[in-house]
Image (tube, rainbow, N blue to C red):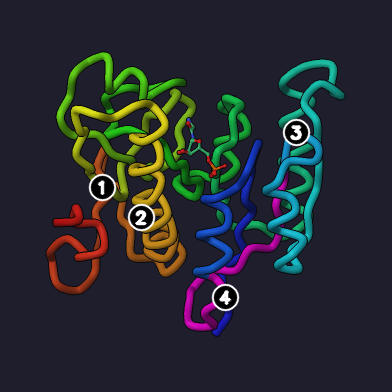
Amino acid sequence: MARVKVGVLISGRGSNLQSLIDATADPGYPAEIALVVSNIPEVYGLERARAAGIETATLPHDDYPNRAAFEESVARTLVGAGCEIVCLAGFMRVLGSDFVARWPNRMLNIHPSLLPSFKGLHTQRKALEAGVTLAGCTVHIVTPDLDDGPILAQAAVPVLPSDTEDTLSARILEQEHRIYPAALAWLASGRVRIEGRRAILDNGRGEPDPVVMPPV
Ligand code: GAR
């Protein structure tokens, strides 16, 4: 079976990258990671990629005169590796519309909130400050608007009275590691149809896949 080639963009420790590496270790998984790109040198995520025998590239954004030049370099590197899908996994740079347009409906992001609530940074702190009782994470198609775009998968977790930003982040992260590999598998196997703002999953049963249902 030909597997879809994926490029993963990271800026840090790469725990979501690891969940994708682990999923792609199964030969039946419909995607393989062809390249990991970091905009920050020497982050732990790069080590994870190397340990899995995956090609890496470090492209520090500060080395470029402007955003367009940085993004052009990232895009060329991804295209050179044959990446058909791009996954943002803790990649902390906003990408411009020219970059996004190269992979229309073929670029995914994971965000640690139940979008459209709490876009941007410090989402877990915002959730605690807002006093919500449910928090969670979202995998969505990347569009030029920040943390926007059709939603493929979400998982919810409770917010406990004793929670700190760290404990809530850890509870959410566990769910990120479940839903990202699932969402990538759907996209890579051609089971996602985009209609307006909605991503519709065709799993042949006309119902949500159990993997995205919140834990009981
Ligand atoms: C994850 O929680 C991810 O959802 C978040 O950064 C963390 C990266 O962790 N991404 C964003 O906030 C993007 N807006 P990781 O490097 O261990 O995957």
Left or right: 71 in relation to 103: right
Q: Which residue is label 1 attached to?
A: 155
Mark 3 or 4 closer to N-term? 4
Mark 3 or 1 closer to N-term? 3
- Element at label 2: helix
Neighbour tally class for label 1: few under 14, some 14-19, many 20 plus, Cα within 10 Å: many
Instruction: Assign the N terminus to one quadrant of the image.
Output: bottom right
Beta carbon at label 1 within 8 Å of ligand 1: no
Quadrant of the image occupied by residue 156 = top left
Q: Which residue is label 3 attached to?
A: 40
Q: Which residue is label 2 attached to?
A: 179
- Mark 3 vs mark 2, CA separation in Å: 25 Å
Q: Which residue is label 4 attached to?
A: 25
- Mark 3 vs mark 1, CA separation in Å: 29 Å
Mark 3 or 2 closer to N-term? 3
Disc 2 to disc 1: CB gap under 8 Å: yes
- Element at label 4: loop
- Mark 1 vs mark 4, CA separation in Å: 23 Å
Q: Position of residue 163 (x, y in %)?
A: 28, 30
Amino acid identity at mark 3: Ile
- Relative depth, front residue between 14 and 91: 14
Residue range of the region highlighted in magenta in the rendering: 24-37
